[in-house]
Amino acid sequence: MKKLLTILAAAIFLPVLAADFPAGSPKFGTNYEEALATAKKEGKPVVLVFSAAWCPPCQAMKKSVYPSAEVKPLQDKFVWAYLDVDEEPNAKAAEQYKVQGIPHVQFLDKEGKALISQVGGVSAAEFAGILTKVAEKAGK
């Protein structure tokens, strides 16, 4: 019976978790410190996405920009972190980068130094252009 309940719970909750990021999305982490450590280790710039579940432009970018055909070729050049502004562990990072409006995408070099930020929703093509400029600026 216990095994059946475990299987049933997995069948219900795993699709919900998997649906959180659409297929083709970057490999988002959810921890600021881990993102910085990974960036330093892998020598990649960082994309910090400050967002919230209640933010329509944030959800639109989550569904159609990050997994888009325009962004997909650039995904592996970065370390990605999706930071919900409503979660207490992300408050310090949001304060550090002066997040006032969301979506707020903060771009960092591999050492964690702020490069540029993008506030507000943008199209997939615009976001791909920003990623390209950041990669060039960061030497990737």
Image (spheres, rainbow, N blue to C red):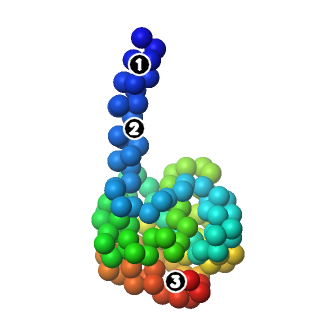
Return the residue at label 1.
5
Report if the CB atoms under discs 2 and 3 are less than 8 Å apart: no
The label nearer to you, 2 versus 3, is 2
As shown in the figure, which amino acid type bears the numbered disc 3?
Val
The x, y position of residue 131, in whole percent, is 46, 80
Which element type, helix, strand or loop, lies under badge 3? Answer: helix
The x, y position of residue 8, in whole percent, is 36, 24
Residue at 40% of width from left, 30% of height from top? 10
Which element type, helix, strand or loop, lies under badge 1? Answer: helix
The label nearer to you, 1 versus 3, is 1
The x, y position of residue 49, in whole percent, is 49, 65
Return the residue at label 3.
134
**Quick one: label 3, few (<14), some, or many (20+) residues within 10 Å?**
many
As shown in the figure, which amino acid type bears the numbered disc 1?
Leu
Q: Is residue 85 visible?
A: no
Nearest the camera: 129 or 3?
3
Residue at 54% of width from left, 56% of height from top? 29
**Quick one: label 2, few (<14), some, or many (20+) residues within 10 Å?**
few
Return the residue at label 2.
14
Residue at 40% of width from left, 75% of height from top? 73
| Quadrant including the C terminus | bottom right
Which element type, helix, strand or loop, lies under badge 2? Answer: helix
Cα distance, mark 1 to mark 3?
47 Å
The x, y position of residue 138, in whole percent, is 59, 84
